Amino acid sequence: MSAEQMTARAGAAAGRRPAPRPSALRRRISALWPPVLLAAIIVAAWELIVDVFDISELTIAKPSAIVSEIGEMSSLLFDATWITTQEIVYGFLLSAVVGALLALVVARFAWLDRALYPLVVLFQNVPKVALAPIFILWFGYGLTPKLLLVVVIAFFPVTVNMRAGLAAADQDLLLLMRSVGASRWQVLSKIQIPTSLPYLFAGLRIAITFSVIGAIVAEFAGAQEGLGYLIQYGSTQLDTPLVFAALTFVSVLGLVLYYALAGLEWLVQRRFPLPRADV
Amino acid sequence: MTPTAISARSIEMVFAGREEPQVVLDGVDLDVPAGRFVTLLGPSGCGKSTLLKIIGGLLAPTSGTVEIGGRPAAEAIKAREIGLVFQRPALLPWKSALANVAFINEIIGGRAARAEALERAEEMLELVGLGHAKHKLPSELSGGMAQRVSIARALAMDPDILLMDEPFGALDAITRDRMNASLLDIWAKTSKTIVFVTHSISEAVFLSDEVHVMEAHPGRIAESLTIDLPRPRTPETLEHPRFGELERHLRQGLVPAGAAA
């Protein structure tokens, strides 16, 4: 047994949570290098294939061309990234609030759940990407139509998961709360909402990726700035390296936002740990 | 004569079944004198948990009345005269043992009652033998310890009556024996009236002053037996010839000779 493991055991025995161990970090790093290596191989192969078969730069940009494009166009790309980031983050936050509130409302009023929830599910069958032109028509080229599209795409997973989480509270505990005359608000705030947090975060993880899609699609439909706009502009100008450079930024942005959320989830989960199956 | 803590009269409970109404309880009468340890013993589906819920005022019977200390059960539970312990501990996983025990009193009394609730919770954890584990989270407790916390939580409101629905059913046999011994110890110190639901014959005999044997289809009390074993009950009680006799008697009633399944 290593020294770290011994310390961790002693910590657990003393009733404290064991401190994050260096070995955990090492394990994470060792889990990281296979995908990194594979990505490097793919990038190298990409470069090589474009070179060997002499594929036109209009069709596909090779990695080295993308890197030099990013170097040349960095201020344009970073400005666009800032715009798109705002659309995604504000849209995501709105989706989270709208989605969670909707879940709370249908959990509170059973009749509303019966009336509203089927409609919400039905609304899911509308291809919401197709709503983008309508939102542009109504609200112009500014931030509003983007936020709206992000919300209609991203609120649903939040609602579904949070609704399930609110219903997952321990039935015996709810009985106990009722028996001592606890108010509905007490039941909600002390038991149901904390219990629903892991479910909520599962929904938020889906919502953040949907938010990226929503913002880019909204920019496709009508925008004068942002990464989605750059992609579309680049493709109409046959500026393939610019398209690929913008794509790279969108991908990295999506990753960063996703892992920022995962970090937040980790913090919340330390405060509200999951129940064990038998407790 | 001891006053009657619980008095149930002609309790009938009918649930709407898929084809025909299901009679879960058919005219049950039950009197529990104050301070007694009473067990409802029976196979699954005999309605013993339903009866417990009705006694606790958590469920309204189709017909019949329950009086707790002379008033309706629904009022008694609002007056916090009834403590509940379930089969699973049902603790909040993000709160320490201490905070879990204090939780109900905080709900009742609000922020102002917090200090008092915590003080009371500490006493109760000492009482159930968990004073050393008060800062542990439920995930750091064994099944038996977690169930002790839930007993402490029920006692924290200082109810007159403790209703326990198969509280040790999910524990292993050895832990269960220990929990039984310590429950009797807690009972002796607090002098509560306890109604205990179980399907273990030996558990019922070991713990109780009175065992009410229930039958299913329809659920009713088939026999009420006074357990005349001396107290305090100890592991030696299990060796007592009378213990064997009572256990055998109950087993014969519940599992007739030659009956398959």
Image: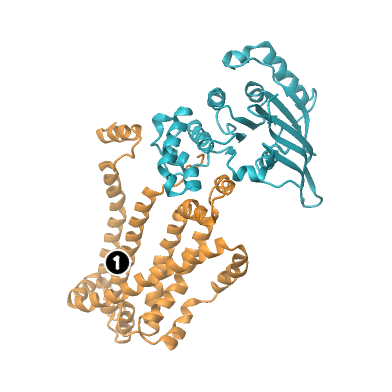
Judge from the rendering whether residue B146 lies leftward or rightward of residue A109; answer left or right: left
**Picture coordinates of residue B147 (x, y %)?**
52, 34
Tell which residue pokes out farthest to the right in this image.
Answer: B20
Q: Relative to residue A85, is residue B77 drawn left or right?
A: right
Position above or below: A259 against A127 = above
Is A160 above or below relative to B251?
below
Q: Quadrant of residue A203?
A: bottom left
Q: Give the side of residue B93 with respect to residue B88, left or right.
A: left
What colour scheme does the image use? Answer: by chain
Residue for badge 1: A252
Chain B visual colour: cyan
Quadrant containing the N terminus of chain A in the rendered view: top left
Q: Is residue B85 visible?
A: no
Quadrant of the image occupied by residue A176: top right
Provide the chain ID for the residue under circle 1: A
Residue A114, x across and y down, in percent = 62, 66
- Give above or below for A231 relative to B226: below
**Label 1 SS:** helix
Q: Identify the chain drawn in orange.
A: A
Q: Residue at x 45, y 58 (%)?
A: A200
- Whether residue A74 is visible here, answered yes or no, is yes
Report the number of discs. 1
Give the answer, above or below, for where B237 lies relative to A82. Answer: above
Q: Position of residue B2 (x, y in %)?
A: 68, 26
Circle 1: residue type: Val
In percent of width and height, residue B74 lies at 66, 46
The one nearer the camera, A34 or A42, is: A34
Few, some or many residues within 10 Å of mark 1 (<14, 14–19, 20+): few
Find residue B82 and report its image quarter. top right
